[in-house]
Amino acid sequence: MDTVSVRYIVDNVDEAIAFYTKHLDFRVDLHPAPGFASLSRGNLRLLLNAPGAGGAGQAMPDGRKPAPGGWNRIQFEVEDLTATVETLHQAGASFRNDIVIGNGGKQILLDDPAGNCIELFEPPRK
């Protein structure tokens, strides 16, 4: 599989780097300026931009400005969702909901420090 890139707008790039590297096993590939960083995990490249930084952080012609948050998300599969959530709770992470259990497995929505949504997913055991 080729590398897939996702761009998240974040309030504080350094804070986001710490969150993704410490809690979600990303590595920093590039951090040339305070307003931008490129992280990776497997085939996923996560591009972090502060509002106003670089081309991706600029206002649109109609005046709308890139901002963190929203409901689009990246999904990470985990082996033990309950244990992962407990570890993140102890680290002060913020969740949008409690663990939801359905036919397809278990999931929960985690917010990064800027409010961008991350889905943690545990598939059903075989």
Image: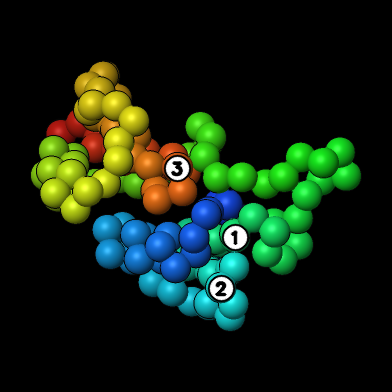
- View extreme (right): residue: 61
Q: How many marks?
A: 3
Within 10 Å of disc 1 (Cα), the crowding (few <14, some 14-19, many 20+) is many
Q: Is residue 43 above or below residue 83?
A: below
**Can the viewer see residue 109 in this picture?**
yes
Q: Where the C terminus falls, by quadrant?
A: top left
Residue pointed to by mark 2: 34
In depth, the one of 3 and 119 nearer the eye is: 119
Q: How is the image coloured?
A: rainbow
Type of the residue with mark 1: Asn
Q: Secondary structure at mark 3?
A: loop
Q: Quadrant of residue 101?
A: top left
Q: CA distance from mark 2 to mark 3?
A: 19 Å
Q: Is residue 124 above or below residue 26?
A: above
Type of the residue with mark 3: Gly
Type of the residue with mark 2: Pro
Instruction: Please report whichever mark, 3 or 1, sits nearer to the chain's N-terminal start.
Output: 1
Q: Residue at x 26, y 19 (%)?
A: 102
Q: Quadrant of residue 55?
A: bottom right
Residue pointed to by mark 3: 115
Q: CA distance from mark 2 to mark 1?
A: 9 Å
Instruction: Please report whichever mark, 2 or 1, sits nearer to the chain's N-terminal start.
Output: 2
Q: Is residue 44 above or below residue 115?
A: below
Q: Is residue 94 left or right of residue 47?
A: left
Do the CB atoms of the residues marked 2 and 3 lie less than 8 Å apart? no
In depth, the one of 87 and 126 nearer the eye is: 87
Query: Of tags 2 and 1, which is closer to the observer?
Result: 2
Q: Residue at x 53, y 69 (%)?
A: 38
> In the rendering, at what x and y percent does residue 51 appear?
64, 55
Q: Residue at x 22, y 48 (%)?
A: 92
> In the rendering, at what x and y percent does residue 120 appear?
31, 40
Residue pointed to by mark 1: 49
